[in-house]
Amino acid sequence: MQRMGMVLGLKPEKVEEYVRLHAAVWPDVLTMISACNIKNYSIYLKRPENLLFSYFEYHGTDYAADMAKMAADPKTQEWWSVCMPC
């Protein structure tokens, strides 16, 4: 198992939209996350700095292949396009 973390900044005017979107992540996206061997995925928002800290545990054997699988998924691509402006 590998522990992964990432920090991203949100645009101040997009924080509420990001929070709203992630309060109801699409089921197909959650299914793909699991199918790509990701578990215990959490995202924390630090305000007022609007910094996101994400953490997950990768339980697979080929991270690059699993991330390519996720990136090729049409529903995940759609989700990313909705979230990207944030």
Image (cartoon, grey):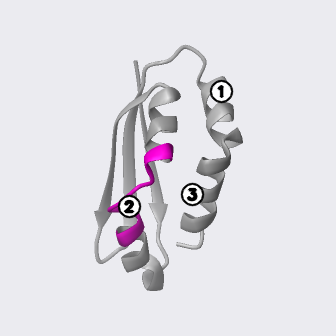
Tag 3: Cα neighbours inside 10 Å, few (<14), some, or many (≥20)? some
Give above or below for 19 relative to 36: below
Q: Position of residue 65 (x, y in %)?
A: 67, 24
Look at 41% across and 66% down and name the residue there: 21
User: Which amino acid type is shown beneath numbered disc 2?
Assistant: His
Q: Tell me the number on the disc at residue 34.
A: none
The Cα–Cα distance between marks 3 and 2, rounded to whole angstroms, is: 10 Å
Give above or below for 22 relative to 67: below
Q: Is residue 3 left or right of residue 29?
A: left
Q: Position of residue 14 (x, y in %)?
A: 46, 79
Q: Quadrant of residue 55?
A: top left
Q: Earlier in the sequence, mark 1 or mark 2?
A: 2
Q: In the rendered structure, which segment of residues is drawn in magenta? A: 20-28
- On whether residue 45 falls in the magenta region, the answer is no
Q: Which numbered mark, 1 or 2, is in the foreground of this view?
A: 2
Q: Is residue 54 left or right of residue 79?
A: left
Look at 69% across and 33% down and name the residue there: 68
Residue for badge 1: 64
